[in-house]
Image (cartoon, helix red, strand yellow):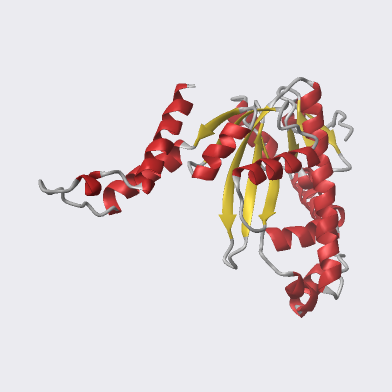
Amino acid sequence: MEFTEFKSESPVWTYFLRCKEREKARCNTCQDILACKGGSTSGLRSHLKIKHKINLPTVGPSTSSSQAVVKVSHQQDIRSLLSSSTSTEQVVAELTACDRLTFNQLATSKRIREALQSQGHKIPKKPGDIRDLVLSHHALKKEEVKEELSKRREKGERFSLTLDEYTSLSDKRYASINLHAQDSSYFSLGMVPIRGSLPAEKAVELVSERLESFGISLSSDIVAATTDGAKVMVKFGRLIPSLHQLCFSHGYHLAVCDFLYKPQVPQHPDTSEDEEETSDDEAEEAEQGKEICGTIKK
Protein backbone atom coordinates (compact mmCIF):
# COMPACT_ATOMS: atom_id res chain seq x y z
CA MET A 1 0.00 0.00 0.00
CA GLU A 2 1.25 3.46 -0.93
CA PHE A 3 0.47 6.29 1.51
CA THR A 4 0.55 9.94 0.44
CA GLU A 5 -0.36 13.29 1.95
CA PHE A 6 -4.03 14.15 1.75
CA LYS A 7 -4.95 17.80 1.35
CA SER A 8 -8.03 18.62 3.37
CA GLU A 9 -9.43 21.36 5.58
CA SER A 10 -9.74 18.81 8.38
CA PRO A 11 -6.84 19.09 10.86
CA VAL A 12 -6.86 15.29 11.23
CA TRP A 13 -4.88 14.77 8.05
CA THR A 14 -1.97 16.72 9.50
CA TYR A 15 -1.23 13.58 11.53
CA PHE A 16 -1.94 10.91 8.90
CA LEU A 17 -1.03 9.78 5.39
CA ARG A 18 -3.77 8.27 3.24
CA CYS A 19 -4.00 5.26 0.93
CA LYS A 20 -6.99 6.16 -1.23
CA GLU A 21 -7.27 2.84 -3.09
CA ARG A 22 -7.77 0.78 0.07
CA GLU A 23 -9.30 3.48 2.28
CA LYS A 24 -6.56 3.26 4.89
CA ALA A 25 -4.66 5.88 6.87
CA ARG A 26 -1.24 5.59 8.52
CA CYS A 27 -0.39 7.52 11.66
CA ASN A 28 2.73 9.66 11.25
CA THR A 29 3.57 9.22 14.95
CA CYS A 30 3.27 5.45 15.59
CA GLN A 31 2.83 4.09 12.03
CA ASP A 32 -0.46 2.34 12.96
CA ILE A 33 -2.71 1.68 9.96
CA LEU A 34 -6.40 2.52 10.46
CA ALA A 35 -9.51 2.30 8.31
CA CYS A 36 -11.07 5.50 6.94
CA LYS A 37 -13.93 4.19 4.84
CA GLY A 38 -15.57 6.87 2.74
CA GLY A 39 -13.15 9.46 4.08
CA SER A 40 -14.50 9.17 7.63
CA THR A 41 -12.11 10.58 10.24
CA SER A 42 -13.94 9.57 13.44
CA GLY A 43 -11.66 6.57 13.97
CA LEU A 44 -8.59 8.68 13.30
CA ARG A 45 -9.71 11.31 15.84
CA SER A 46 -10.27 8.58 18.43
CA HIS A 47 -6.80 7.18 17.75
CA LEU A 48 -5.18 10.59 18.29
CA LYS A 49 -7.20 11.24 21.46
CA ILE A 50 -6.69 7.83 23.12
CA LYS A 51 -3.18 6.89 22.07
CA HIS A 52 -1.45 10.25 21.60
CA LYS A 53 -3.56 12.49 23.89
CA ILE A 54 -4.29 14.83 20.97
CA ASN A 55 -7.83 16.17 21.17
CA LEU A 56 -8.71 17.94 17.93
CA PRO A 57 -11.61 20.42 17.88
CA THR A 58 -14.76 19.25 16.14
CA VAL A 59 -15.82 21.44 13.23
CA GLY A 60 -19.27 22.76 14.05
CA PRO A 61 -22.14 23.38 11.61
CA SER A 62 -21.85 26.46 9.45
CA THR A 63 -24.28 29.30 9.73
CA SER A 64 -24.01 30.59 6.17
CA SER A 65 -26.45 29.27 3.59
CA SER A 66 -23.76 28.82 0.93
CA GLN A 67 -21.61 26.76 3.26
CA ALA A 68 -24.65 24.75 4.33
CA VAL A 69 -25.33 23.82 0.70
CA VAL A 70 -21.74 22.68 0.28
CA LYS A 71 -22.03 20.53 3.40
CA VAL A 72 -25.14 18.73 2.12
CA SER A 73 -23.42 18.10 -1.20
CA HIS A 74 -20.39 16.68 0.63
CA GLN A 75 -22.59 14.22 2.56
CA GLN A 76 -24.11 13.00 -0.70
CA ASP A 77 -20.62 12.43 -2.10
CA ILE A 78 -19.72 10.32 0.93
CA ARG A 79 -22.80 8.14 0.52
CA SER A 80 -22.12 7.54 -3.14
CA LEU A 81 -18.49 6.75 -2.34
CA LEU A 82 -19.48 4.21 0.30
CA SER A 83 -21.84 2.34 -2.02
CA SER A 84 -19.42 2.27 -4.93
CA SER A 85 -16.10 1.65 -3.18
CA THR A 86 -17.15 -1.23 -0.90
CA SER A 87 -16.62 -4.43 -2.85
CA THR A 88 -19.23 -7.16 -3.07
CA GLU A 89 -16.74 -9.57 -1.51
CA GLN A 90 -16.36 -7.32 1.55
CA VAL A 91 -20.12 -6.83 1.95
CA VAL A 92 -20.83 -10.57 1.76
CA ALA A 93 -17.94 -11.40 4.10
CA GLU A 94 -19.16 -8.92 6.72
CA LEU A 95 -22.72 -10.22 6.48
CA THR A 96 -21.54 -13.76 7.17
CA ALA A 97 -18.86 -13.00 9.78
CA CYS A 98 -20.49 -10.08 11.65
CA ASP A 99 -24.23 -10.61 11.08
CA ARG A 100 -23.99 -14.43 11.05
CA LEU A 101 -25.98 -14.87 7.85
CA THR A 102 -25.40 -18.22 6.18
CA PHE A 103 -24.38 -18.67 2.56
CA ASN A 104 -27.78 -20.25 1.90
CA GLN A 105 -29.65 -17.28 3.41
CA LEU A 106 -27.78 -14.82 1.20
CA ALA A 107 -28.43 -17.00 -1.84
CA THR A 108 -32.16 -17.51 -1.26
CA SER A 109 -33.44 -14.42 0.62
CA LYS A 110 -35.26 -12.20 -1.85
CA ARG A 111 -35.26 -9.13 0.39
CA ILE A 112 -31.54 -9.34 1.16
CA ARG A 113 -30.68 -9.78 -2.50
CA GLU A 114 -32.88 -6.83 -3.56
CA ALA A 115 -31.36 -4.60 -0.87
CA LEU A 116 -27.82 -5.45 -1.98
CA GLN A 117 -28.64 -5.11 -5.67
CA SER A 118 -30.04 -1.61 -5.01
CA GLN A 119 -26.50 -0.67 -3.88
CA GLY A 120 -24.94 -2.11 -7.02
CA HIS A 121 -23.90 -5.50 -5.64
CA LYS A 122 -24.58 -8.56 -7.76
CA ILE A 123 -25.04 -11.51 -5.43
CA PRO A 124 -24.62 -15.07 -6.77
CA LYS A 125 -27.60 -17.41 -6.51
CA LYS A 126 -25.60 -20.44 -5.38
CA PRO A 127 -24.30 -20.82 -1.80
CA GLY A 128 -21.04 -22.23 -3.14
CA ASP A 129 -20.39 -19.11 -5.21
CA ILE A 130 -21.08 -16.89 -2.19
CA ARG A 131 -18.59 -18.97 -0.22
CA ASP A 132 -16.01 -18.29 -2.93
CA LEU A 133 -16.58 -14.53 -2.50
CA VAL A 134 -15.98 -14.78 1.24
CA LEU A 135 -12.81 -16.81 0.74
CA SER A 136 -11.61 -14.29 -1.84
CA HIS A 137 -12.03 -11.44 0.64
CA HIS A 138 -10.34 -13.51 3.34
CA ALA A 139 -7.33 -14.04 1.08
CA LEU A 140 -7.11 -10.28 0.45
CA LYS A 141 -7.24 -9.43 4.15
CA LYS A 142 -4.72 -12.13 4.96
CA GLU A 143 -2.25 -10.62 2.49
CA GLU A 144 -2.74 -7.20 4.11
CA VAL A 145 -1.96 -8.67 7.55
CA LYS A 146 1.08 -10.52 6.18
CA GLU A 147 2.33 -7.28 4.62
CA GLU A 148 1.94 -5.41 7.91
CA LEU A 149 3.67 -8.15 9.90
CA SER A 150 6.50 -8.28 7.38
CA LYS A 151 7.13 -4.55 7.78
CA ARG A 152 7.22 -4.91 11.55
CA ARG A 153 9.66 -7.83 11.33
CA GLU A 154 11.94 -5.80 9.06
CA LYS A 155 12.11 -3.18 11.83
CA GLY A 156 13.25 -5.86 14.28
CA GLU A 157 9.93 -6.17 16.09
CA ARG A 158 9.02 -9.43 17.82
CA PHE A 159 5.66 -10.67 19.03
CA SER A 160 3.80 -12.60 21.70
CA LEU A 161 0.81 -14.86 21.15
CA THR A 162 -2.29 -15.96 23.02
CA LEU A 163 -3.91 -19.32 22.42
CA ASP A 164 -7.25 -20.71 23.56
CA GLU A 165 -9.60 -23.51 22.54
CA TYR A 166 -13.19 -22.79 21.46
CA THR A 167 -16.08 -25.23 21.05
CA SER A 168 -18.99 -24.16 18.84
CA LEU A 169 -22.69 -24.88 19.44
CA SER A 170 -22.41 -27.71 16.92
CA ASP A 171 -19.64 -29.24 19.09
CA LYS A 172 -16.83 -28.41 16.67
CA ARG A 173 -13.49 -27.48 18.23
CA TYR A 174 -11.19 -24.67 17.15
CA ALA A 175 -7.98 -23.07 18.33
CA SER A 176 -8.06 -19.27 18.43
CA ILE A 177 -4.61 -17.75 17.82
CA ASN A 178 -3.88 -14.04 18.30
CA LEU A 179 -0.59 -12.27 17.68
CA HIS A 180 0.29 -9.26 19.87
CA ALA A 181 2.71 -6.50 18.82
CA GLN A 182 4.87 -4.23 20.96
CA ASP A 183 2.55 -1.22 20.55
CA SER A 184 -0.41 -3.12 22.07
CA SER A 185 -2.01 -3.77 18.67
CA TYR A 186 -2.96 -7.34 17.86
CA PHE A 187 -3.71 -9.50 14.84
CA SER A 188 -6.20 -12.34 14.76
CA LEU A 189 -4.72 -15.29 12.87
CA GLY A 190 -8.10 -16.98 12.69
CA MET A 191 -9.74 -20.09 14.10
CA VAL A 192 -7.84 -23.29 13.36
CA PRO A 193 -10.02 -26.44 13.24
CA ILE A 194 -9.08 -29.17 15.74
CA ARG A 195 -9.79 -32.66 14.46
CA GLY A 196 -9.49 -35.50 16.93
CA SER A 197 -7.42 -35.28 20.08
CA LEU A 198 -5.00 -32.43 20.72
CA PRO A 199 -1.90 -33.53 22.59
CA ALA A 200 0.75 -30.93 23.35
CA GLU A 201 2.98 -32.00 20.44
CA LYS A 202 0.11 -31.58 18.00
CA ALA A 203 -0.76 -28.18 19.51
CA VAL A 204 2.81 -26.98 18.91
CA GLU A 205 2.63 -28.19 15.30
CA LEU A 206 -0.76 -26.54 14.76
CA VAL A 207 0.41 -23.17 16.13
CA SER A 208 3.69 -23.30 14.21
CA GLU A 209 1.96 -24.00 10.90
CA ARG A 210 -0.52 -21.15 11.35
CA LEU A 211 2.26 -18.70 12.27
CA GLU A 212 4.32 -19.75 9.25
CA SER A 213 1.34 -19.13 6.96
CA PHE A 214 1.63 -15.47 8.04
CA GLY A 215 5.41 -15.37 7.69
CA ILE A 216 6.08 -15.67 11.45
CA SER A 217 8.48 -18.16 13.02
CA LEU A 218 7.61 -19.70 16.39
CA SER A 219 11.29 -20.11 17.24
CA SER A 220 12.65 -16.68 16.25
CA ASP A 221 9.73 -14.20 16.17
CA ILE A 222 7.77 -15.18 19.30
CA VAL A 223 9.09 -14.14 22.71
CA ALA A 224 6.20 -15.36 24.89
CA ALA A 225 2.93 -17.27 24.77
CA THR A 226 -0.06 -17.10 27.13
CA THR A 227 -2.49 -20.01 27.56
CA ASP A 228 -4.89 -21.37 30.15
CA GLY A 229 -3.74 -23.82 32.82
CA ALA A 230 -4.95 -27.06 31.25
CA LYS A 231 -2.44 -29.92 31.50
CA VAL A 232 -1.97 -30.06 27.72
CA MET A 233 -1.17 -26.34 27.67
CA VAL A 234 1.29 -26.69 30.54
CA LYS A 235 3.15 -29.28 28.49
CA PHE A 236 2.77 -27.07 25.41
CA GLY A 237 4.62 -24.35 27.31
CA ARG A 238 7.49 -26.71 28.07
CA LEU A 239 7.85 -27.70 24.41
CA ILE A 240 7.94 -24.26 22.78
CA PRO A 241 11.23 -22.28 22.70
CA SER A 242 9.68 -19.03 23.98
CA LEU A 243 8.56 -18.06 27.47
CA HIS A 244 5.23 -19.44 28.62
CA GLN A 245 2.78 -17.61 30.88
CA LEU A 246 -0.28 -19.34 32.33
CA CYS A 247 -3.34 -17.09 32.34
CA PHE A 248 -3.93 -15.49 35.75
CA SER A 249 -7.66 -15.05 35.07
CA HIS A 250 -8.06 -18.75 34.39
CA GLY A 251 -6.21 -19.57 37.62
CA TYR A 252 -8.39 -17.20 39.65
CA HIS A 253 -11.52 -18.72 38.08
CA LEU A 254 -10.47 -22.26 39.02
CA ALA A 255 -9.64 -21.17 42.58
CA VAL A 256 -13.03 -19.46 43.06
CA CYS A 257 -14.92 -22.44 41.63
CA ASP A 258 -12.92 -24.82 43.81
CA PHE A 259 -13.72 -22.80 46.93
CA LEU A 260 -17.40 -22.18 46.20
CA TYR A 261 -18.56 -25.38 44.54
CA LYS A 262 -16.22 -28.24 45.50
CA PRO A 263 -17.85 -30.47 48.17
CA GLN A 264 -16.07 -30.27 51.48
CA VAL A 265 -15.40 -33.79 52.81
CA PRO A 266 -15.07 -33.84 56.63
CA GLN A 267 -11.94 -35.48 58.03
CA HIS A 268 -12.50 -38.15 60.70
CA PRO A 269 -9.88 -39.11 63.31
CA ASP A 270 -10.09 -42.79 62.39
CA THR A 271 -9.40 -42.27 58.68
CA SER A 272 -7.12 -44.98 57.36
CA GLU A 273 -3.79 -44.24 55.68
CA ASP A 274 -5.19 -45.33 52.32
CA GLU A 275 -8.00 -42.80 52.56
CA GLU A 276 -5.56 -40.05 53.48
CA GLU A 277 -3.40 -40.59 50.39
CA THR A 278 -3.66 -37.90 47.77
CA SER A 279 -5.72 -38.92 44.74
CA ASP A 280 -4.31 -38.82 41.25
CA ASP A 281 -6.38 -35.77 40.37
CA GLU A 282 -5.19 -33.88 43.44
CA ALA A 283 -1.60 -34.75 42.61
CA GLU A 284 -2.06 -33.41 39.09
CA GLU A 285 -3.58 -30.20 40.47
CA ALA A 286 -0.65 -29.81 42.84
CA GLU A 287 1.78 -30.30 39.96
CA GLN A 288 -0.11 -27.70 37.93
CA GLY A 289 0.11 -25.27 40.86
CA LYS A 290 3.88 -25.74 40.93
CA GLU A 291 4.02 -25.01 37.19
CA ILE A 292 2.09 -21.77 37.68
CA CYS A 293 4.34 -20.68 40.54
CA GLY A 294 7.43 -21.54 38.52
CA THR A 295 6.17 -19.52 35.58
CA ILE A 296 5.44 -16.51 37.77
CA LYS A 297 8.95 -16.65 39.26
CA LYS A 298 10.46 -16.64 35.79
The correct choice, above or below, for 140 with respect to 195 in the image is: above
Which sits in the foreground, 127 or 56?
127
Which percent across, then down, holds residue 234?
52, 38
Image quarter of residue 178? top right
Which percent across, then down, holds residue 246?
50, 35
Which percent across, then down, holds residue 188?
68, 43
Which sits in the foreground, 198 or 96?
198
Residue ID at (77%, 32%) = 149
Residue ID at (81%, 72%) = 127
Image quarter of residue 64? top right
**Residue 58 in view:** no
The correct choice, above or below, for 293 with respect to 34 in the image is: above
Which percent across, then down, holds residue 13?
77, 30
Image quarter of residue 136? bottom right
168 left or right, relative to 142 = left
8 left or right, relative to 202 = right
Which sits in the foreground, 197 or 190?
197
Work out which residue is located at the far left of the displayed protein and give it: 269
Residue ID at (48%, 27%) = 295
115 left or right, relative to 84 = left
**Residue 132 in view:** yes
Residue ID at (42%, 28%) = 293
3 left or right, relative to 272 = right
The correct choice, above or below, for 66 with respect to 5 in the image is: below
